[in-house]
Image: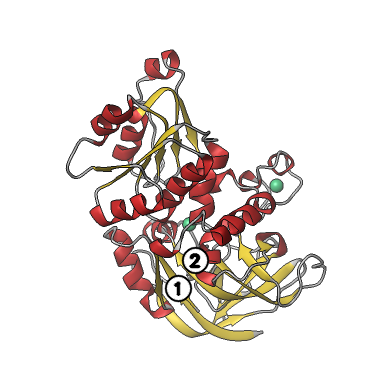
């Protein structure tokens, strides 16, 4: 058992509170204790703050982290103290139908890991005797406890802030391009939303060999960043009609990615997708129905609309590849990272709300 600093959600639609005395219990069977090196601040954390009831409170948010194994529970064989790990925000069981089909993000047997507890239904966190709910990897803390399947060992000297982003934004964006959409050499692509996930999708499309990558955003500085990271064309949606602009450039793209989770831009993504193309939806959105989609176009143009969850990832296959691309410089993160401290966490959420920041990362 130990105490540490952590930012907790006590009340929905209110700032997180940073405590110095979160109690973290020892890892139990099949679990590991991780000393966090860095944790990204993701829009999904903000959704959870704003969507009342999504998780029990108090709760420890944060789901994009990397760190060092500090202790292992009984039965842990693949990881040892001192290993560097990137944390996944899912805990795939390894034997359900989806896991057997190498779709671990779609595992049906991981219980409440994303929203409430570790796999045995309990939490290792408490504050002054009150249980603090788990929120997958729960990385807004100096220490967290996760199932061993959620901690993937990496061997690299890359900085923690890069490795933390592999845990969510990079895998989600790069994976959407490479795994979900399977962008191929010569394809054309448009990416709506140039935050951490969208910029990763831009880079995934570039690595896959897309011939044209159109970045769409309303923020000129984010568009400039997209250009640095591989976009060939920029569309400022605050100045022009984004659908018309993309159609003018390409006649409709082979791949449109929506990385904001906003219905009007989902509509735009569908409309800028060309014949035989695919619209890939990445941004989390409150549930709704898409009955306004022009279905005839889907049929006669063989267009597809696909969801992408965690970049259709397979961590043991994808994460060594991504780490390799980071080491070689094919994947560039430094331009999009803003380093902050845990005390800045509420300012960080304000900056996500105002869409100012690309990716803010807490350094511990
Ligand atoms: Zn995330
Ligand atoms: Zn499973």
Picture coordinates of residue 111, whole percent (x, y)? 64, 54
Across and down, in percent, residue 186 comes to 47, 31
Q: Which residue is mark 1?
A: 362
Q: Is residue 280 above or below residue 247?
A: below
Q: Which of the two residues, 173 or 146, is positioned nearer the viewer here?
A: 173
> Dot 2: what SS?
loop
Asked whether the beta carbons under mark 1 and mark 2 sit within 8 Å of each other, the answer is: yes
Q: Residue 2: image x %, image y %?
A: 63, 86
- Figure disc tally: 2
Mark 2, residue position: 62
- The answer to whether residue 1 shows anywhere in this view is yes
Asked whether, in this view, residue 114 is left or right of residue 81, the answer is left
Q: Is residue 3 above or below residue 74?
A: below
User: Which of the two marks, 1 or 2, is nearer to us in this view?
Assistant: 1
Which SS class for mark 1?
strand
Where residue 201 sits: x, y (%)? 45, 46
What residue do we see at 55% from left, 59% from top?
326
For the question of whether residue 167 can be seen, the reply is no
232 lies left or right of 28: left
Q: Which quadrant, please, contains the N terminus?
A: bottom right
Nearest the eye: 81 or 330 = 330
Residue at 55 percent of width and 84 percent of height: 4
Label 1, label 2: how many angstroms apart (C-alpha)?
10 Å
Viewer-proximal residue among 140 and 286: 140
């Amino acid at each position: 058992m130990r105490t540490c600093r952590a930012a907790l959600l006590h009340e929905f639609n209110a700032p997180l509170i940073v405590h110095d005395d979160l109690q973290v219990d020892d890892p139990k069977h099949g679990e590991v204790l991780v000393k966090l090196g860095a944790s990204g601040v993701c829009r999904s954390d903000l959704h959870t703050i704003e969507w009342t009831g999504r998780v029990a409170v108090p709760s420890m948010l944060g789901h994009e982290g990397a760190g060092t194994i500090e202790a292992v529970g009984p039965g842990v064989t693949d990881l040892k103290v001192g290993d560097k790990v990137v944390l996944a925000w899912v805990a795939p069981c390894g034997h359900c139908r989806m896991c057997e089909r190498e779709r671990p993000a779609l595992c049906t047997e991981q219980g409440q890991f994303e929203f409430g507890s570790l796999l045995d239904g309990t939490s290792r966190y408490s504050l002054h005797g009150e249980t603090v709910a788990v929120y997958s990897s729960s990385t807004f803390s100096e220490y967290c406890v996760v199932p061993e399947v959620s901690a993937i060992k990496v061997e690299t000297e890359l900085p923690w802030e890069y490795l933390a982003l592999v845990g969510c934004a990079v895998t989600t964006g790069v994976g959407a391009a490479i795994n979900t959409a399977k962008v191929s050499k010569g394809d054309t692509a448009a990416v709506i939303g140039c935050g951490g996930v969208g910029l990763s999708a831009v880079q995934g499309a570039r690595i896959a060999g897309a011939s044209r990558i159109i970045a769409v955003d309303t923020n000129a500085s984010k568009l400039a960043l997209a250009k640095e990271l591989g976009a060939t064309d920029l569309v400022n949606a605050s100045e022009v009609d984004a659908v018309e602009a993309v159609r003018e450039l390409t006649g409709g793209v082979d791949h449109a990615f929506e990385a904001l989770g906003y219905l009007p831009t989902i509509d735009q993504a569908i409309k800028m997708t060309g014949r035989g193309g695919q619209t890939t939806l990445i941004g989390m959105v409150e549930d709704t129905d898409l009955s306004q989609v022009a279905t005839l176009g889907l049929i006669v143009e063989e267009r597809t609309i696909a969801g992408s969850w965690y970049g259709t990832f397979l961590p043991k296959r994808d994460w060594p590849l991504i780490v390799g691309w980071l080491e070689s410089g094919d994947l560039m993160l430094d331009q999009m990272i803003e380093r902050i401290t845990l005390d800045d966490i509420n300012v960080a959420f304000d900056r996500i709300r105002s869409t100012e920041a690309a990716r803010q990362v807490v350094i511990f």
